[in-house]
Structures are given as structure tokens and as C-alpha cells.
Image (spheres, helix red, strand yellow):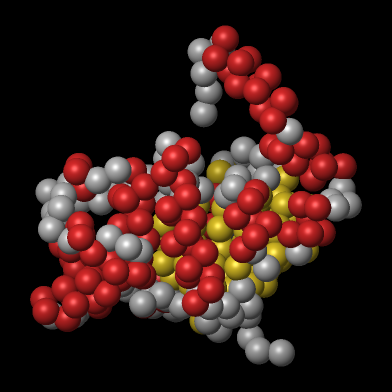
Amino acid sequence: MSRPEIEVRGLHKSFGDNEVLRGIDLEIGQGEVVCVIGPSGSGKSTLLRCVNLLEEPTRGQVFVGGVELTDPDVDIDAARRRIGMVFQQFNLFPHLTVTENLALPQRRVLGRGKAEAARVAAENLERVGLSEKATAYPSSLSGGQQQRVAIARALAMGPRAMLFDEPTSALDPELVGDVLAVMRMLANEGMTMMVVTHEMTFAREVADRVVFMDGGLIVEDGTPAQVIGAPRHERTRHFLSRLLDPAMAEVEEETSDQVGGGT
């Protein structure tokens, strides 16, 4: 068996007395798509941020492409270049055009010349279906378009793997589909992907595996048919019933509205 593209061993993360991750072991093979689901506060996003050391683990090891990111002697900047990260918010520079948003990281981090960076930017804008927006500024784009630009920016760095942290959660419902379509394309191209999401349809159709987390632990790890279709643990069944039951969702939305909304 080939070495996993992403490997997490005995990962713990605490913020003061709050232990958010309590011993995570996870392997993601090359070209595999793994969706991580679970309730708020379960540690999903913290795990994702520990994979590229945006959060430093309290203890444990993280490997990407066989390189240990948690090794004190590792060149962390070089190691991070192996991993693309897409956040809930788009984090585009408002004063730069779309092409300039893609070219700047290439020039600053990878040392590419202006012409090469522009060429790679154009290639990746075409991949996400936004070639016509090359000279536009972020303020003129919809949220979905901005997120696709953010994906193209990450791809322009040539990553071995892509991490997505709730990439559609800040979008209006009608804009979600275009972003998920780009992610489906990447999966079909063989990109290794770790996706924190509540989009169960995407997880069912695209993921090779689904990981359910709760309380800083992995509760279930299996195929979408196993974890979503026939969960073994009561905690997983309870989470999915609330997420997938439209009647329950409507009641919770009405309750949230009555108390002033929530996040």
C-alpha cells in the first residue's frame, strides 16, 4: 500500500483547559476525498487547521506527502506549499483584480515571474469557470464567484492536497451549486481533498469516505453509504436526523428566529 497523502497520528489540541482534539488518528490516501461532518464544537475545523499547522497541535504528528509538518526542524513554509486551504470567508484583496489576487501569492511565495504567474492564474480561472472575470475586482463578484476565485488561488500554488473548511456556509443557497461543481471537478481530476461540510448531498455523491466527529474524537469513519446511510452509533444517527429532517430543520429555524437568530 502506498504512503497516505495526509496522515494524522495521536493528534491532541488544547486551548487552555479546553481539550478540543482528544487523540485523532486519520489517513487520507492520494486522490481520496474525505468529508468531515459533525456538530459545532466537535473539533472539525480545528483538525483541518492542525493539518497545515495554522493551529499548532498540543501533541501528535501530522504528515503530508510523507513529510512531517510537526517535526521541529521542518521547513514549514515549504511544507505548507503542499496544501491548499479554502476558508468559509474568501479573504481576497479588494484592491487587486482577480488575476492579481491569484498572481501575488505565486510571485511572493513561489518566486514566479510576472508572466508565468499570470499564465497560471489564467489557467486556473478557466478551471473554475471564471476566465471572463480576470480583470474584475472582488466587490463586483457574487459570493459564489469570490469563493471560486479563492479555490483558483489555492490551485495556482500547485498543491498536493486541498483542505476546505465549510466552503459554502457563507453563501446564499442559490450560489452553493457552482462552488460544489468546482469541487466535484477537482475530485474527478484526482485531487486529494479533506472537506469539512454540512452538504450531505455532496458528501454522499463525491466523498470516498465520511468521518463523523463529536467531542474531539472520530466516532465513525467509513463510506458515505455506511456513515450517512446506515450509521452504527446513536450519536451519528441523532446528528444526521436533525440535519436531514426538513421538519426538524424548520422547527429549529423558527426557534432561532424567535430568539434573535444564531450562527
145 or 73, nearer to the observer: 145
* Rendering quarter of residue 209: bottom right
Which quadrant, please, contains the N terminus?
Answer: bottom right
Q: Which residue is drawn at the image coordinates 85% and 53% (left, top)?
A: 230
Residue 81 in view in this figure: yes
Q: Which residue is drawn at the image coordinates 30% and 57% (left, top)?
A: 149
134 or 44, nearer to the observer: 134
Residue at the far top: name it. 258
**Residue 48: x percent and y percent?**
54, 57
Q: Which residue is drawn at the image coordinates 57% and 9% (left, top)?
A: 258
Left/right placement of residue 132 relative to residue 33 reads left
**Residue 164: x percent and y percent?**
49, 57
Residue 12 in view in this figure: no
**Residue 236: x percent and y percent?**
79, 45
Q: Which residue is drawn at the image coordinates 36% and 52% (left, top)?
A: 147
**Residue 54: x percent and y percent?**
44, 58
* Rendering quarter of residue 27: bottom right
